[in-house]
Image: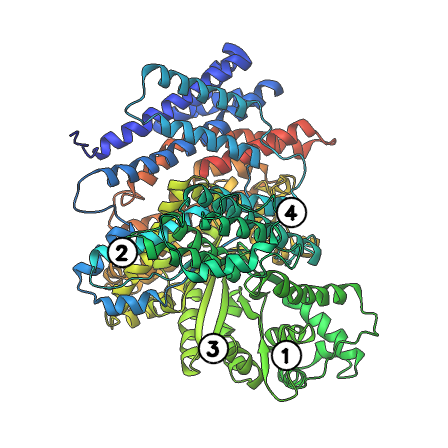
Amino acid sequence: MTTIKEPSQQENHAMLRRDVKMLGNLLGDVLYHHGGQEVLDQVEYIREMTKSLRIHPDSSTFTKLKNTIKTLEPSLRRQVIRAFAIYFHLVNIAEQNHRVRRRREYQLTSSERPQPGSISEAVMLLKEQDVPASYIHEYIHTLSLELILTAHPTEAMRRTVLEIHQRIADKLEQMDNPFLTRREKENLKETLYNEILTLWQTDELRDKKPTVMDEVSNGLFYFDETLFEVLPHIHQELEDNLVEAYPEEDWQVPNFLRFGSWIGGDRDGNPFVTPEVTWKTLEKQRKKALKKYKESVRNLMKSLSHSTNRIHVTEELLDTINKEIELLDDKQKWRVSHEVYRCKLTIMLKKLNEVGNSADGYQSAEDFLKDLMLIHDSLKSHYPEGYRLSDLRNLIRQVELFGFHLATLDIRNHSGEHEAAIHELFKRVNLTTDYASLHEEEKVALLEKVLNDPRPVLSTYEDYSASTQKIIEVFQMIKKAHKEFGPRSISVYLISMTQSASDVLEVLVLAKEAGIYRLHADGTIESNLHVAPLLETIDDLKAGPKIMKKLFNTKAYREHLAKLGNSQEIMLGYSDGSKDGGTLTANWKLYRAQQEITRVAHDYGLKLKFFHGRGGALGRGGGPLRRSILSQPQETYTAGIKITEQGEVLSSRYLLYDIAYRSLEQATSTLLQAAVQLNNPKDESNTIWENAMEEISQTSLSKYQSLVFQDPDFLSYFKEGTPLPELGKLNIGSRPMSRKGSNRFEDLRAIPWVFAWTQSRQLLPAWYAAGAGLQEFAERDDQNMELMKEMYQKWPFFRSTVDNLQMALAKADLTTAREYTNMIEDRETAKRIFSNIEKEYETTKSIILRITEQEELLDNSLSIKESIRLRNPYVDPLSFLQVEMISNYRQSNEADEELLQDILLTINGIAAGLRNTG
């Protein structure tokens, strides 16, 4: 028997370098084929200079590099840009494949310790720490993690390009097969060359903005490729590990892990998301789910050939076949009547085909599930005890998870839209002439009065304004969707920019007018839609506890919650809070808001689910999913966690099955480890830590706002010193860059704000002002540095915050960033503000190294550190090219489309190199 030796870390890195080198050489062959030796030599010459500058900074080499870039002919320039950009895509694929390789190596070794972050490890830790099975039973039934796909920022890469990446990844993985013959290896290498050649010959930029339905298709792509299969397997993995660790227990793991979507439902600032588009989205999602189920039913028909000549089936199964056989004509019936499972599955396939088309189809996913359970129970009656019906159980779990709706679609809209509609509705029926100008107390009283009156406010005889009519149609569509697709199809309505209790009650009134919330004449209530406030700005987060207390004190709202299991969902926005107050203050205020709102809810006997609106980039609350979960207050775990998965991270997390599995396994493992933390009493020192964070946050906020809001030249520095104006030309999303088409900073969306800073290599939103807060706190008392070291070691929130800061600092590059300041017209402003940023960078880096007790940034995460180190020399040429071209483009009197396309290619390439858009 062959023993598989676990590779050392050095061997692991060697295998990754081998893959990168092979892909790089194949790309070189492609370059030579297309541009000859000249292109290959030019790319290599620029690469060698940037590598040299990283090791030995030298002014003459730097001047030579800039002159080389400046004098590139347009045709050669484009090929150089594309060469570096595609190289990053290949490196990303190689790194993903390496993650898959490492996971499989853990599974193949006979090591007693499972892979860190795995479900196996989490269950083993529960067992080792003597966590009783009774506690785990109780805990997993409160466990809930919902991951919500969003289109913004959408994937910068085209779907076509993603599919090429997927094929390259598949072939690269096959190269690891130790049983490949020499000829098979050569064939694989040839296929890889062909795919890289195809990638080179494919347009990487979209020629027009994607429509909302394009974005819907992109989101569904991941359900089709991985999620539909991965989710049931994660649940089964947990169940199997619990059975192994606690064999005396009967384990039935509930469906704790689900995916939802905003794509096609997020109306906030996107005029293209209409009720009609949302309806088409729901239809498209159902079609995808039904397609998957029909494939599974056909596969079951192949395997369930059991004959009643050999076995006995249950009477319940036979009864349903006899009752429903008339649904099929003679040609459709299964030809062998004693193969009863095939007879039943043929009927089920017919009913799936008729869903949404006729009364003969399944009216709900629950009806389909009942039929599957009939087959399951019948099979169990003639199978050995304990035998697992894997394929059937997998399908049953899929139906439980995805229903006929596939993914619950959240609807989101701006609070101002609702207020305007309510203002008009109330005015038409003389409830008040000017609702919008009422004081908050008057608004709440009037809204509660309407909610307590069964009579409608909406009149069928009135002609409402177009904007009000659109809002009415949204709620009417939700009511219709509940009937057509089931109540799980749309279960939450989110209100962006929630600033008061009336903002929430307005939505409940609009739901009442559509019949989603109903007060009957006998006083009974129906309510089928969660209304979730979105707290975004620093001021809104501070006001959050007061807003929720006001709502919980409102009788009509409490009755609405009672119909929804006394559960309230609250969304927390990371993007606008960070843009408003800096990343450190935003994260702290989000943490405090959760604690305080949880205490308020506890006083009223209510459960809370916090929905974390995190971006993909560090400046918008991004970072590893595992770290995001760990950084929340412990008391919020048991109510369930909901987190956005932004468009830009989807391909890196869910394009490949093994990567998707690993990402979701780590999230599950983290939730299980939280069970141990919740079993332990809260450390008294947390109060000291929280007081320290409050002090640090106040200083940081002051520092941040002194630059962003109080420096009159800052906005010019930002707009001129980054590619912000050009980003709007990169067709990566259907939503406009700013609210209301405004040029004001307040209306600029957080996505382009972060994207532009990332491109200029400053990454300012991800770290700026944190150092000022941490440094001043350290100087205030000799003991404070030791306190922060203790906080870093023992407090997951602080550790997560500091580790995200050091990752941002490591990705930032102020040497390259200085080049972007050359695009700023006022040289004194450029020098003054950049000096401020540079000084704060050094302060932040210094204090982070002291807190973490490291020699260099990311010494505690060597794989990420190495990845950034290797990528930087290849990102640099794209940055230098971008600065040169943007300067020329902005100075030109005529629009140069060819130059603009090259600028956009550098934006795409830098995003791939840094693995971040916004």
Dot 2 amino acid type? Glu
Q: Distance between the residues labelled 1 and 4?
A: 32 Å
Dot 4 amino acid type? Met
- Quadrant (top left, top right, bottom left, bottom right) of the N terminus: top left
- Closer to the observer: label 3 or label 1? 1
The residue wearing badge 1 is: 518
- Closer to the observer: label 1 or label 4? 1
Q: Is mark 4 on a helix, strand or loop?
A: helix
Q: How far apart are marks 4 and 2 (CA)?
A: 48 Å
At which x and y percent is residue 76? 57, 18
Marks 1 and 4, the one that precedes in the sequence: 4
Quarter of the rendering containing residue 499: bottom right
The residue wearing badge 4 is: 213
Could you say which disc has been placed on residue 385 in the image? Answer: 2
Indicate how the structure is coloured in the image. Answer: rainbow
**With 403 as the anchor, is 19 left or right in this view?**
left
User: What residue lies at 45% left-to-right and 28% top-to-bottom?
Assistant: 168
Is residue 580 among the parts visible in the rendering?
no
Q: Which of 850 and 381 is in front in this view?
A: 381
At which x and y percent is residue 108? 23, 37
- Closer to the observer: label 4 or label 2? 2
Q: Which of 777 and 809 is in front in this view?
A: 809
The residue wearing badge 3 is: 566
At which x and y percent is residue 245? 20, 57
